[in-house]
């Protein structure tokens, strides 16, 4: 059996190397609750309380290292392997939907059918846009928390520990950017005894296409503030080659990616996965017209959840997807691995 590694190895291989994505997989699985993020501007990786089962008490653990997506080689694929490419749209109204509301429709139908008992994802305070990791356990809440969060200030997967250890949920869906997806997949694939309960409880992994995410404090409290924008004036954010802001008074404002470059999180600069290659279902806006979600259904589990939503009458799908733009963005992002 491979030798187990401690947070000290994670510190050397990932934190000090500047490749931490902030996914929070290590925070969620640490059995000693010893890893955490300090919520301050420019924080790029977790901190340890100093106690570690392995490093302090010589008890074999290795959970943090084994769950981390940055301790292994990243895949070099663009579209990746898939069963179906779909143009999808929620049939029920999802007021805050980002694209076609398909992610919310799939999750809501799954919860109604009892296929999942919780969803771990990222939500935000709609006034401050401050994000937080959340465990959702009802369909109504899912609709309330629809929409994309481009801000980061907390480990997304932190609520997975609440779901599994505190609430004893066993059929969990995870929604996240590709780095979060990789962390969740690492838990599912791991032979580490401490990760097996996590892997066994994850039933569905939905990935969101991603070019980068932004440090909340740097974007909101520095860049947007200097542009004269307060968080409560922002209704919706969207990134498609630029940062588009829809304001609460109905007007729009745009910042170039150069203007927001210093808010991009450090770990995003070495991330090569655009299309959530390890997800059961990947979802994005490019590849289909406004008002639709592009779905890349990669696994048999993914097929089952999409079919369930269509059968429940909450999701409509067709097969018209323009793959060229997805491949182009994915190939450009992959160059960060060179
Ligand atoms: C940081 C980021 C960057 C993105 N970049 C691109 C891009 O470059 N090109 C592109 O085509 N698409 C991108 N997307 C995906 C796109 O914005 C939509 O999320 C996707 O099309 C699904 O839309 P929907 O209407 O079906 O989702 P909805 O029905 O609105 O549901 C969205 C779901 O995602 C969850 N969620 C939102 N933000 C996060 C987050 N940061 N972490 C974890 N869960 C979250 C919500 O809780 C909700 O469950 C990005 C998303 C994010 C979060
Ligand atoms: S990439 Fe995720 S698992 Fe790895 S150190 Fe960073 S937060 Fe922890
Ligand atoms: S680019 Fe997206 S997927 Fe990659 S580390 Fe940043 S947030 Fe995660």
Image (tube, grey):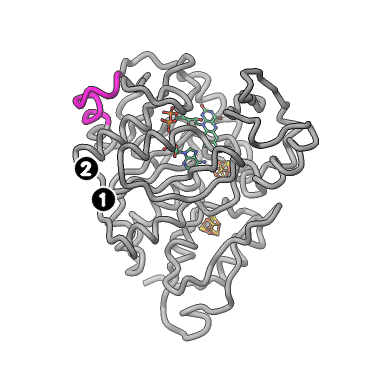
Mark 2 vs 1, N-terminal side: 2
Q: Is residue 255 left or right of residue 326?
A: right
> Residue 244's x, y, as percent?
64, 24
> Residue 261's x, y, as percent?
73, 37
Magenta region: 306-316
Q: Which residue matches tag 1?
A: 171
**Ligand 3 position by quadrant:** top right
**Quarter occupied by residue 142:** top left
Residue 337 shown in magenta: no
| Residue 135 versus residue 239 in the image, above or below | below
> Residue 158's x, y, as percent?
46, 57
| Residue 68 versus residue 329 in the image, above or below | below
Name the residue rendered at 62%, 36% in the picture: 335
Name the residue rendered at 70%, 40% in the picture: 219
The answer to whether mark 2 and mark 1 are in CB contact below 8 A is yes
Secondary structure of residue under mark 2 = loop
Secondary structure of residue under mark 1 = loop
Residue 307 shown in magenta: yes
**Disc 2 to disc 1, how far (Cα)?**
7 Å
Quick one: 199 or 161, which is closer to the camera?
161
Mark 2 crowd level (few <14, some 14–19, many ≥20, 10 Å Cα): some
Q: Which residue matches tag 2?
A: 115
Name the residue rendered at 20%, 43% in the picture: 114
């Amino acid at each position: 059996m491979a030798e187990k590694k401690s947070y000290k190895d994670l510190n050397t291989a990932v934190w000090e190397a500047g490749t931490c994505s902030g996914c929070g997989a290590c925070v969620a699985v640490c059995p000693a609750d010893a890893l955490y993020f300090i919520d301050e501007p420019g924080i790029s990786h977790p901190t340890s309380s100093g106690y570690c089962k392995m490093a302090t008490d010589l008890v074999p653990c290795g959970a943090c290292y084994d769950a981390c997506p940055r301790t292994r080689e990243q895949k070099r694929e663009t579209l990746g392997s898939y069963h179906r490419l779909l143009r999808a749209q929620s049939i029920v109204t999802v007021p805050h939907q980002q694209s076609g509301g398909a992610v919310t429709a799939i999750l809501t139908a799954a919860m109604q059918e009892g296929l999942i008992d919780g969803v771990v994802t990222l939500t935000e305070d709609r006034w401050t846009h401050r994000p937080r990791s959340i465990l959702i356990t009802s369909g109504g809440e899912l609709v309330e928390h629809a929409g994309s969060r481009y801000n980061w200030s907390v480990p997304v997967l932190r609520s997975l520990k609440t779901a599994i250890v505190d609430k004893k949920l066993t059929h969990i869906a995870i929604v996240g950017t590709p780095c979060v997806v990789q962390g969740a997949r690492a838990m599912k694939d791991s032979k580490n005894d401490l990760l097996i309960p996590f892997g066994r409880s994850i039933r569905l992994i939905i990935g969101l296409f991603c070019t980068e995410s932004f440090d909340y404090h740097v974007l909101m409290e520095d860049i947007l503030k200097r542009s004269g924008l307060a968080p409560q004036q922002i209704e919706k954010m969207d990134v498609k080659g630029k940062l588009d802001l829809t304001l609460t008074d109905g007007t729009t404002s745009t910042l170039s990616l150069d203007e927001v470059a210093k808010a991009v999180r450090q770990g995003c600069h070495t991330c090569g996965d655009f299309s959530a290659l390890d997800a059961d279902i990947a979802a994005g806006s490019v590849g289909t017209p406004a008002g639709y979600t592009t779905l890349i259904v990669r696994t048999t589990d993914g097929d089952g959840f999409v079919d369930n939503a269509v059968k429940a009458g909450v999701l409509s799908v067709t097969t018209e997807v323009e793959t060229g733009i997805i491949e182009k963005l994915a190939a450009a992002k992959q160059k960060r691995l060179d």
